[in-house]
Image (spheres, rainbow, N blue to C red):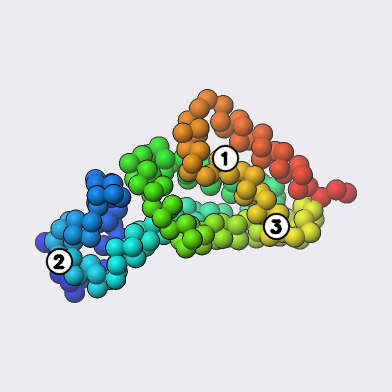
Amino acid sequence: MPPTPQTLTAERILEATEEVLRRHGPAKATVVDVARALGVSHGSVYRHFRTKAALREAVTKRWLDRTTQVLAAIVAAPGPDPETRVREWLAALFAAKRRKAFDDPELFATYTVLTTETAESVVGEHIAELTGQLTELVRAGVAAGAFTAEDPAATAGALFQATGFFHDPHYAREWERPGVEGDFEALVDLLLSGLRARG
C-alpha cells in the first residue's frame, strides 16, 4: 500500500528519489516522478522538501554521508598505532569511493552531476567533515609522539589533497587500472614517512 501523506517521511522520499535518479538520471528525473513512485501527490513531496533543488541537495548529502559514517567509525574506534589508523582511514575512503563507482555506476554518474551542482554547500560540508576526521587522527598522532605536525588541521588538509587521485570522483576511471592499489600504498607510505616524528 502506498504511503499516505501522514506516513510519508523524508527518508522514504529520499529512498524513492535515489531510485528515480538511478532510472532516469539527473536531467530527466522530476519531483512528479518521485511522487509517482511513492503513490502520492507531488505536493506531498514538497511538504518535506520545498523545492526540487532542496530535494536534490538532501539526496546528495545522504549519499555522501554514507562514506562519512564509515570513516567516523574508524576515528572513534580505539585503534592501533597512529600510522595504522591514518592508513586505515585513507584506505577506507578509497575503498568507499571505488565501491560507489563500480557497484552502482549509474547512480555514481548521477551523483557526480549532483555534487557539481551543490559544490558550494553539501560537497563543501562533506570535505570539511572528512578533513576534520583526518585532523583528529593527526592530532592524536602528535599527542602520542608519533607524528610531527605544527598545525594538525593544515597537515590533514595536505594529506587529503595529496591523496585526491584516490577519492576525487573525477579520477574514477583510473581506479580500475592494474597497479592502482600499489600506487595508493606507495603514496601513503611516502606521506606517513613525512609525518613521522624525528627523534
Structural crowding at the residue carrying mark 2, measured as other residues with C-alpha within 10 Å and reported as few (<14), some (14–19) or many (≥20): some
Q: Is residue 196 left or right of residue 51?
A: right
Residue 40, given in percent of the width and then of the height, sits at 14, 65
- In the displayed structure, 137 sits above or below 192; it is below
Compared to 169, does 34 lie above or below?
Answer: below
**Distance in Å between CA atoms under marks 2 and 1:** 43 Å
Label 1 neighbourhood size at 10 Å, few (<14), some (14-19), many (20+)? some
Q: Residue 140 appears in which quarter of the rendering?
A: bottom right
Percent x, y for residue 115?
43, 53
Q: Which residue is mark 2?
A: 41
- Which residue type does callout 1 highlight? Phe
Q: Secondary structure at mark 3?
A: helix
* Residue 154, label in figure: 3
Tell which circle, 3 or 2, labels the residue nearer the N-terminal end.
Answer: 2
Which residue has dot 1 on it? 165
Quarter placement of the N terminus: bottom left
Give, as a three-letter code, the residue at label 2.
Ser
Q: Which of marks 1 and 2 precedes in the sequence?
A: 2
* Residue at the (58%, 44%) spot, across then down: 164
Which amino acid, by three-letter code, is at mark 3? Answer: Ala
Q: Is 184 placed left or right of 46 in the picture?
A: right
Q: Residue at coordinates 28% horizontally, 49% vertically from top-left?
A: 27
